[in-house]
Image: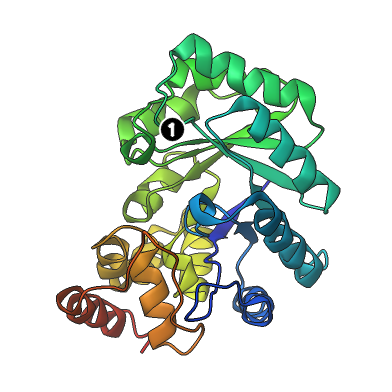
């Protein structure tokens, strides 16, 4: 089972919006050196909505090659078309990804029955172990705990990234989930309580800029060392909030640019972080001791 801090990795781009593969490979090495426990390639933070399928798989392939088995690679494989999600899953498997992360279909707002059939079809048509991803604030559709736990009975559905930030729901998942079903926070601000309630780790935006602290905080929380976990988490709280001051991944890419880790590249319709937000985020970065 995946555990610990799994970074929702950005996709570095040059100023023209073209993928910067050498920098991507450097980021993978840096994360492994810093103790990141797994790498999620081409999730929402990796700008999956603006990468075409060829680029999407090329990024996953590059991350797999650079990780070279040192940490697991989780490929973003979600789509609001079931056929496309299956295709992405099989392509990710072909290039060596260890898991897929499949988001709840966005915009078309399926029913719970439709969500079950969507993920069931994915499970039946790929050998790639799949994590569900529930982020209703972005998809406009909420996967209920009942449906998620029904899906957990399927062989290829091995966990869920829950980005609701709702600790009542997290507690219910931890209580009812079958043994071996992974529970991962998708909300950095509530990752600490999520793990203390029984979660196994996080798929984190904050880990892009503070990988060592996030990894150590998750480990301390999993060990029940609450004092140490709080000591590590407290300086990160500004990052947890302000890395979402504008739409993700606008702030985190600006933060990484400021740290000298990536060039200043985004694809439209995303635009550079506004000046007012830059000042706020810079203060959070200073409080976290990353600049």
Decide if residue 152 is in sight here: no
Decide if residue 68 is in sight here: yes
167 shown above or below 152: below
Residue 38 placement, left or right of 210? right
* Residue 152 found in image quarter: top right
* Depth check, front residue: 289 or 114: 114
Q: Residue at x 63, y 60 (%)?
A: 39
Residue 59 placement, left or right of 90? left
What scheme was used to colour the molecule?
Answer: rainbow
Q: Residue at x 41, y 67 (%)?
A: 228
Residue 55 image offset from top left, x and y in percent: 66, 59
Q: Residue at x 39, y 53 (%)?
A: 192
Residue 191 image offset from top left, x and y in percent: 40, 51
Residue 172 image offset from top left, x and y in percent: 41, 25
* Residue 251 found in image quarter: bottom left
Specify few, some or many for label 1: CA neighbours under 10 Å numbering under 14, 14-19, or 20 or more: some
Quadrant including the N terminus: top right
* Depth check, front residue: 103 or 236: 103
215 shown above or below 131: below
Name the residue that disc number 1 marks: 106
129 shown above or below 11: above
Secondary element type, mark 1:
loop
């Amino acid at each position: 089972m995946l555990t610990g801090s799994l970074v929702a990795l950005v996709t570095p781009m040059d100023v023209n919006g073209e993928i910067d593969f050498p920098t991507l490979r450097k980021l993978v090495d840096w994360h492994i050196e810093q103790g990141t426990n797994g790498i999620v390639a081409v999730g929402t933070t990796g700008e999956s909505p603006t990468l075409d399928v060829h680029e999407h798989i090329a990024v996953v392939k590059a991350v797999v090659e650079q990780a070279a088995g040192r940490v697991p690679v989780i490929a973003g494989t979600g789509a609001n078309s079931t056929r496309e999600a299956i295709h992405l899953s099989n392509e990710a498997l072909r290039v060596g990804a260890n898991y897929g992360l499949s988001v709840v279909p966005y915009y078309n707002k399926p029913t719970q029955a439709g969500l079950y059939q969507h993920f069931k079809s994915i499970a039946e048509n790929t050998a790639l172990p799949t994590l569900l991803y529930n982020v209703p604030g972005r998809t406009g559709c909420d996967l209920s705990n009942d449906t998620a736990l029904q899906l957990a009975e399927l062989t290829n559905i091995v966990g869920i990234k829950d980005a609701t930030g709702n600790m009542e729901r997290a507690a219910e998942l931890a209580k009812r989930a079958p043994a071996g079903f992974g529970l991962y926070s998708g909300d950095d601000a509530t990752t600490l309580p999520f793990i203390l309630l029984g979660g196994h780790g996080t798929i984190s935006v904050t880990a892009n800029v503070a990988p060592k602290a996030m990894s150590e905080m998750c480990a301390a929380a999993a060990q029940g060392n609450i004092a140490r976990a709080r000591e590590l988490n407290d300086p990160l709280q500004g990052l947890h909030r302000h890395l979402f001051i504008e739409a993700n991944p606008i702030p985190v890419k600006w933060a990484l640019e400021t740290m000298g880790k990536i060039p200043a590249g985004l694809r439209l319709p995303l635009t550079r972080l506004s000046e007012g937000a830059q000042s706020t985020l810079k203060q959070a970065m200073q409080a976290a001791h990353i600049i």
